[in-house]
Image (tube, rainbow, N blue to C red):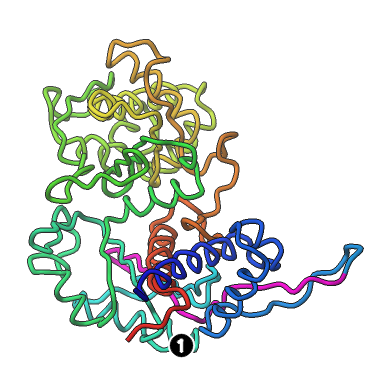
Amino acid sequence: MSTGPSKLRIINDRAALSHILRAGEISRAELEDLTGLSKPATADLLSRLESAGLVQKQGMRSGGPGPKAQLWGVRPEVGFAAGVNVTPANIDVQITDLSGNVVSQHQFAACASAGSGVRRAIQAACITAKISEQQILHTVIGLPGALDPRSGMLKFAPHMPAWSNYDLIAALDLELDMPVTVENDVNLMALAELDGGLAAAAENFALVWIDTGLGAAIVIRRELFRGFTGGAGEIDYLPVPDRAEAETGLDRRGGKFGNLLSPQAIAALARAHGLPGDDPVETLRTAARTGSASGHAAFLNDLALRIATGLSAIVTVLDPELLLLGGAFGVAGGEPLAQLVRENLGEVMNAPHGSTAEVLALGVPSPTAPNRQAKPVDGAPVEGIPAGNALAGASSLALKHAREKAFETGSVMTG
């Protein structure tokens, strides 16, 4: 019969901890109003949470006509979360406490051994933060590829040979000896936008990453859609015809979407319009800034037409309300490129412009999402990283899991 009260206590404790995290610091009276508990029950709850080492007194609030109010806050050192972003060149690590404050952030050169490289990076970050690895409650690792949940193998990542062709999940679990989640890097960027960026109000959207590689994250009903083998959003392999006006020698009948939007292909498109192609990102940035100049407008529209042709598949099948353009080229093109993609979507699909998704570029403020700081679910913002960043998404997701672990039983002791 004792399980009933414990379950109710855990529910009340977790609700209170969630309210305290959102507020940062809170008085007993404020927590009483938020939870609906009586004054004695709220006081008892805070006492239990303090005894369990989950909350602490944060000082007093003054300024009102009555007595000063005692403030409470979550003890951030209860546990920590580690976000990791892996690229072919670097391993970036950020460690946050449970309040979302960054306690350590480092970048390390990638090495041939996947698991040991991440562990050494985390160990170094822990030393800087003056914590032990055992205090990290969850780690999320972002990778440029798709992880097959059935085999644990990384797919669609030819530029990451050290991380491919073996059970990556098993290797990381063995090497790190801590709870680990591995996620596609573009998916993590989408989570960052969902939590506190341009997609904060969206139900269904896609984030399209146009950089040295091409990929997309699909979000349906505010949840990531990964597909049966984890490969949803690998639009690099989508067969798409080249509808650009300028001739660059690519297959007009249909080649890989990634071939149309590679840096080399975009550079060739710029040259076909009489523009410099040595730095295609800068050429695109210039074209977006001065689109009326000779050659710039035509280049910008041709690139938008290529993007829209491929994205018409996403719009037709999923009917999202929002498409986000990211990566070096999505950001460089900015609002002018996003607007042209939207217009070309309507023409490619033979549909009115108003019936297609809204298209926005990362890095461009939107009236519907003015706050671009990454915010993890049910808590304070993760400081130090802008939204639209894989490390921000990794930190946000790791923090969510870490909080669940730290608060799973509230003040009820187990074991």
Which residue occupies 40% across, 39% down?
Answer: 330
Query: In this view of the protein, can residue 400 be seen by the observer?
Result: yes
Can residue 327 be found in the magenta stretch? no
Residue neighbourhood size for the residue with mark 1, other residues' Cα within 10 Å, grouped as few (<14), some (14–19), many (≥20): some
Residue drawn at (49%, 42%) of the image: 200
Decide if residue 82 is in sight here: no
Which quarter of the picture shows residue 343? top left
User: Which residue is nearer to you in this view: 326 or 249?
Assistant: 326
Against 343, residue 103 (above or below) is: below
Give whichever of 41, 357 is nearer the camera. 41
Q: Residue 60 sits in which quadrant?
A: bottom right
Query: Against 86, is 279 above or below?
Result: above
Q: Position of residue 89 (x, y in %)?
A: 30, 67
User: Could you say whether the residue bearing mark 1 is in a helix, strand or loop?
Assistant: loop
Instruction: Determine whether, in the image, residue 170 is placed left or right of residue 415.
Output: left
Whether residue 239 is situated above or below residue 295 in the rendered picture: below
Q: Name the residue under label 1.
A: 131
Q: What amino acid type is highlighted by mark number 1? A: Ile
The quadrant in which the C terminus is found is: bottom left
Is 88 magenta? The answer is: yes
Residue stretch rendered in magenta on the structure: 67-90
